Structure formats: structure tokens, C-alpha cells
Image (cartoon, helix red, strand yellow):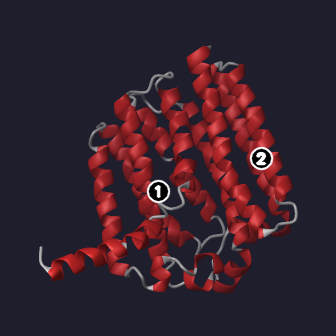
Amino acid sequence: MSLQDLQLSNSRFRRLPDFIQLGRLDRPIGIYLVLWPTLWALWIASDGQPSMKNLVIFITGVFLTRTGGCVINDYADRNLDGDVQRTQNRPLATGRVSPKEALLVAAIIGLLCFVLVLFTNLTTILWSIGALFLACIYPFMKRYTYFPQAILGAAFAWSIPMAFAAAEKPVPALAWLIFGATVLWTMAYDTLYAMVDREDDLKVGIRSTAILFGEADLMIIGILELMAVLALWLLGNQLHFSYWYFGSLVIACGLWCWQLWQCRERDTEQCFKAFLHNHWVGAVIFAGIFLHYSIS
């Protein structure tokens, strides 16, 4: 290898942290928040015995789609992020990654997702078109609607009907209870996330439920979480789940109450911590589903 080739290789390696930050791989909370509802659906769709093939496909798919979604989001916001304190150092906003490079990364990730879904079946492949559509339009919705969190919720929940399709089952009505609960939950925690940037978003013209809800934000977040747990309770009732599952819902409600209390002063740091804490809500509910099928 020539000195010039070695220098080029070292230059590319030094830029690796920029691409890691572009895909938010240094902040995996988004992966967890997409993963838990996906695992809920996989376990229920397979009566507690998901195939190793589907587990690998969907876990890998969650990783790729969340990473690709972050790249598309940063591309869409490349001219806005510099004016928001929390995002002003992102690679596209600072010029460390070019828009063309970001689009190339997004295209590669999209291709990998397409290859991955080919290992399922035709129904799942058709469902995946909706996932691609939602991932592409979400970053632009914050310019046109105060409900981008609802679009994000649908994008995060789209793996649920796909999980039932991949299990070679028609998508049942109860799958939409999981879907609805996931959308409501996502709207709740992403409103907490948006509360962190509310003042900056108002300045640059970005819309969100945090801005729309105003002083009623915490009350409405609580209502969204109450509706989510009601949907999950109806799900458990229909499937005759055991006390393990319903106990997990009680714990989840306790975690949500703690988050709301933590945010009572609307301190941005506390709101961000409460947002991150939702990882444990998803994990607790999955634990209830897992224990139901494993012990009951």
C-alpha cells in the first residue's frame, strides 16, 4: 500500500465518528424504543415461540431502519439544526458530512433493508413499503403539521403488522391494539422529547405536539399514556394473559407517573431524562409478555 493510499485510508477512518453520529449509533435509545413493540408483536404472533430467523431479521431491521431514519431526518433538517441548541453540532449541520454523503448512506441502508425483507414472504415485503414511506415523510411533517409525533408513532409501530405477516398469519384485529398503543406511547414520549427543544423550535418554525399542547402538555401526555395502557389491557383481556402481563402494565403505569412527576417543572434536562426512561417501560411490558408465555 502506497503512502497516499494509507493517508486516504486514515482520513476515512478519522471520519467514522461523524457517520456514527449521523446514524445516532452513539445514542441507541431510538433502537430500543422501536425494538420493544417489535418484540411484543413477534412473541404474540408466534404464541411465545418466534423463530430464530424472524428474530434476526426483525432485530437487524430495527437497527437498520432506525439508523436510516436518523440519516433522512438530519438531511431534512440540515438547514435548521444549526439554530437548535441540542442539534447544532450534528454532522450535517456543521458540514462534517455532506448532503450527498448522507443520501448515499441512506440509500445503502435502504438497500440493505430491502435485501433483509426478501428473506421473509410476499405479504411482509408489501407491508414494508408502508414502513419505507413513513420513514421518508416523517422528517418533513414537522413543517406542515403539529402532529409529527403521530407520524413517528405510525413509523415505529409499522413493524407490528409486519411481525404477524412474517409469522405466516393474517394480521388480526388485536394487532391493531398493539399498533394503537405503540402510536399513543410514542406520541407521549416524543412530546417529552420535543419539550426539550420547544423554545428553539418556535424560533425556527418547527412544529410539534409540545408546541400545540402548550401548558396542557403533561396532562395530555398522561391521557395518551392512559389510552395506551387501556389498549394494552384490552389486548391482554382478549388473549387471556396471566397476571405476569397485567402486573407489567401496573409497573409501566408507575414508571409513567414517575416521569410526569419528574417533568413537573418542565426543566429541559428532566424532560430529556424522562424521555430516555421510556426504554424501561417497553422492557417491562415485554418482560410481562415473555413471562406469560414462558411460565404460565
- In this view, the residue farthest toward the top is 296
For residue 66, which numbered disc appears in the image? 1
Q: What amino acid does circle 2 point to? A: Trp
Q: Quadrant of residue 132?
A: bottom left
Measure how far apart labels 2 and 1 are at the Cα level: 24 Å
15 relative position to 40: left or right: left
Residue 31 lies, with reference to residue 293, above or below; the image says: below
Rendered residue at 47%/44% (across/down): 159
Q: Is residue 98 left or right of residue 257?
A: left
Residue 261: give x, y in percent of width and height. Answer: 86, 54
Judge by depth and name the residue closer to the eye, 22 or 216.
22
Q: Nearer the viewer, residue 1 or 185?
A: 1
Q: Nearer the viewer, residue 220 or 196?
A: 196
Mark 1, other Cα within 10 Å: few <14 / some 14–19 / many ≥20: many
In the image, what residue type sits under mark 1?
A: Arg
Quarter of the figure that contains the N terminus: bottom left
Residue at position x 73%, y 56% from top? 274
The residue that disc 2 covers is 256
**Secondary-structure class at tag 2:** helix
Element assignment for label 1 = helix
Q: Quadrant of the C terminus?
A: top right
Q: Residue at x 68, y 34 (%)?
A: 232
